[in-house]
Amino acid sequence: MKKIIGHVSFDDSRYPALLKEIPDPPTRLFCRGQLPHPDSICIAIIGTRKATTQGKAMAQRIARDLAASGIVIVSGLAMGIDTVAHKGALEASGKTIAVLANGLDNVYPAQNTSLANDLLAHGGAILSEYPAGTPAYPNQFLERNRIVSGLCVATIVVEAPERSGTLATARFALEQGREVFVVPGPADHPNYIGSHRLVRDGARLVTAASDIYEDLGIDPKPQPSPQQFLFAQEATPVEQAIMETLTVAGKPLSIDKIAELTTMEARAINAALASLVMAELVKETEHGYSI
């Protein structure tokens, strides 16, 4: 099947606003998939291709937690940290963007073709400044890195050896006036030499998504699941009110408490809850009903 590759020029209203602010923005972006909404918060997660098991687990968890709050995860689709960052976002049914150093008629590396298709299927995008047919030349990876950081309000570094493209991306982020966060590791591990140097130079140390929320002043709001989106289109006013009340409460509520908060009759609430439980959108527990 033919790949649909679009493009946006610098003066196009769809061109990412943050990317316009960097010193040398691409004059046009080639795109497969959907560009993020202008109001979306994008955060890059990057690191070495030869990552440790612990580093990959950390990157995947942070990506999953951030994406669950509606943050778009940006990375480079490389093996190692990039791969698990994209996967973590998809685990949360979130959106993720991959920036490539070659034309979009081919995925590089080829091993991540299936991952690229998955992120497109979940409303994400694959971007490049290079037209179709352009091979992945070594110097283009460095040029690509400025786009990864330029799309984002912040970049999270997970495992950066002493000499790596990861450090180059972090430097681009600093030059662009963006925040740089670093996940720490063992002092004597070669994968963390560059990471710890970034911390000494002023990057912020983080170990969880909550650190990112706090430092950036982001209010983490859980995103509705795909089932909730589908249900919302057909839900009755009573069912919608119950879902909103339980979501805000963040804990199980009794029928009487739901009636008090919604000012609706207990009989109507009881019937609506039965439908919501059958739809597996609400759970009945010994302490009441919850999302």
Image (spheres, helix red, strand yellow):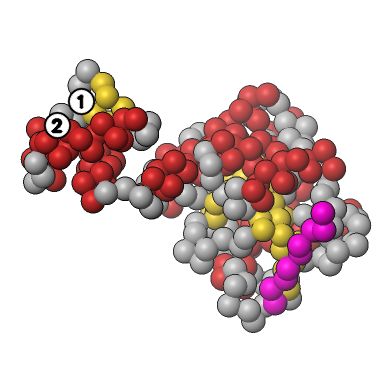
The residue labelled by disc 1 is: 288
Of the 4 image quadrants, the one containing the N terminus is bottom right
Mark 1 vs mark 2: which is more N-terminal? 2
Secondary structure of residue under mark 2: helix
- The CA span between labels 1 and 2 is 7 Å
Residue at left offset 24%, top offset 34%: 273
Callout 2: 10 Å neighbours few (<14), some, many (20+)? some
Residues at marks 1 and 2 touching, judged by CB atoms closer than 8 Å: yes
- Classify residue 19 as left or right of residue 224: right
Between residue 133 and residue 99, name the one nearer to us.
Answer: 133
Q: Amino acid at mark 1?
A: Gly
Residue 160 in percent (x, y) is at: 70, 39
Residue 42 in percent (x, y) is at 55, 55
Nearer to me, 189 or 126: 126
Which kind of residue does numbered mark 2 sit on?
Ile
Residue count near mark 1 (Cα–Cα under 10 Å), binned few <14, some 14–19, many ≥20: some
Magenta range is 1-9
Q: Is residue 135 rendered to the left or right of residue 265? A: right
Can the viewer see residue 253? yes
